[in-house]
Amino acid sequence: MRDRLLFAWLASHKLPRVGAAALLLFAGAPGALSAVSAQTLNVALAADIRSTDPGVNRDDMTDAVVLHVVEGLVGYRENGTVAPLLAESVQTSKDGLTYTFKLRRDVHFHNGNKMTSADVLWSWQRYMNPKTGWACLDEFDGRKGLKVTKVSAPDAATVVMQLNHPSSLFLDTMARTYCGMTAVLDKASVKADGTWDKPIGTGPFKLTEWKRGESVLLSAYAGYKSPPGNRPDGYVGAKAPLVDAVKFVIVPDTSSAKAGLQSGALSIARIAPSDIAELQADKRLKVVVGQVASKNALLLQTRDPVLGNQKLRQAIAASLDVPQIAAAISEGHSPANASAVPTSSAYYDGVQKRGYAYDPVRAKRLLREAGYKGQKITIFANKRVNVPSYTIAVLAQAMMQAVGINAVIEVLEWTTQLDRYYSGAYQISSFSYSSRIDPALSYEQFAGDKTRQPQKVWDDPQALSLIEQSRDEVNVAKRQTMFDQLHTTMLDQVPVIFLSNGVDPWAVGQRVEGFMPWEGKPRLWQTRVGK
């Protein structure tokens, strides 16, 4: 009966062929939540993966799946710092040029082979071979300044890496998800001719089957040894597989995913922020909202004849009720954040919490001091469903108009808005930046020489110098001072008005326990299906 109802619902709503087919497959599958749900988690994936090779031919969907299978020497904590993962410890020399990794001795690959320093060396050499096509090769070969000059293995449990100069971002880069966490692989991951076969890693799940365009099946690795910790912490901490299998099914649109959740065909799926309230009221489901380090912002063109006036930019900032905007675009799930440092970061201190005070009286005074004569100020926005660009623009326009600013909205196609962004051809642009975990990388997204890179928003010479210094400084306290100084200066100069970080809402079946996404990706370790 349930299957017939689901079929009728899918047909009547004319869902995309792939999504409908996938959900019908799951409706009758033995791994469906209503059947053997204690053993299998069925997870919606918005698009098929590109490959199974970590950090090679990848995108976010690929990373989300593959990082259940492979692990690196280090991984991110939830506060953005980096911790040992396959390494037991990491020691840095006083000059910041040598990193010594002591390996955990309890780690085995999915084929049963014990992981040693020889596997780390083999994996590193493969990544550094240009023929591999690793996405992060240029981060380590000197093209971006940093170069790993030597890698050695004094014994089976030790790996030593030497750099050409100190870098606060070396471990961060190794841990990045789009680098595949610089995963350590068994040599059997490649075929005899050296071409890629499949990942034989150390993660809590192993790859069982990839049906292209349909699903990816992972099975729990019985020999997995979790790193220290009593709870998941980013990509480190407790990581035990608590179900027999995880099946990622390709469901390309949120309406199909919602139908799958409500029918019980899906265990877990990302949902649209606009669906949070509806699904919270559904007794069959629970809603889990994660935070991401993306940044929702209003970009102000400081080289514009009108907005080049700093007092006018300060007036715009004072006209905005940023907490109200943040609450509106996140359904109340993300606080206001005027900083380039995400609220989850270890660097998010008292200084970073300072923002723009909503003060219409001050805004009007600043407009007078700026000599503002009612010139039109255009806000570019787009109506993509997965970003709050248009909602931000509407709220900002109303608040700016309330203090006497002649703000108008021009809605653009996303590709057109992106072209204007890259050329710097806008006055105000309602824009969202993707996640950057380390503050230095977050600042680099929008700060730089506008003459050479017109898409950059902030080109203050002293700020650019501080950002560059923060890349090389390994002392945490000194980096904190730099980021605090940058934030204070940015609030005064107002080249950009950051509003909030992003939210990542998911819905799960009522029996699913322990699930929490991180940085836009599902984590299926430490997740179970209760009775």
Image (cartoon, rainbow, N blue to C red):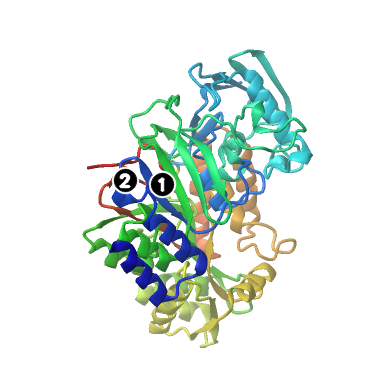
Instruction: Please give the name of the residue rendered at 21% of the width and 59% of the height, measured from the top-left corner.
Output: 283
Q: Nearer the viewer, residue 414 or 215?
A: 215
Instruction: Please give the name of the residue rendered at 48% of the width and 47% of the height, measured from the top-left corner.
Output: 484
Residue 344 numbered tag: 1
Q: Nearer the viewer, residue 374 or 173?
A: 173
Instruction: Please give the name of the residue rendered at 32% of the width and 45% of the height, measured from the top-left corner.
Output: 37
Residue occupied by mark 2: 37
Give the image location of residue 13, x and y in percent: 40, 75
Give the image location of residue 338, x and y in percent: 44, 59
Residue 159 as seen in the image, left or right of residue 195: left
Q: Nearer the viewer, mark 1 or mark 2?
A: 2
Residue 281 in sight from this viewpoint: yes
Question: Mark 1, residues whose alpha carbon is within 10 Å: few (<14), some, or many (≥20)?
Answer: some
Q: Could you give the CA–CA distance between mark 1 and mark 2, rounded to whole angstroms? A: 33 Å
Q: For numbered disc 1, what is the local secondary structure?
A: loop
- Mark 1 or mark 2, earlier in chain: 2
Q: Quadrant of residue 530?
A: top left
- The three-letter amino acid code for the residue at tag 1 is Ser
Residue 425 as seen in the image, left or right of residue 486: right
Q: Nearer the viewer, residue 342 or 492?
A: 342
Reply above or below: 295 against 70.
below
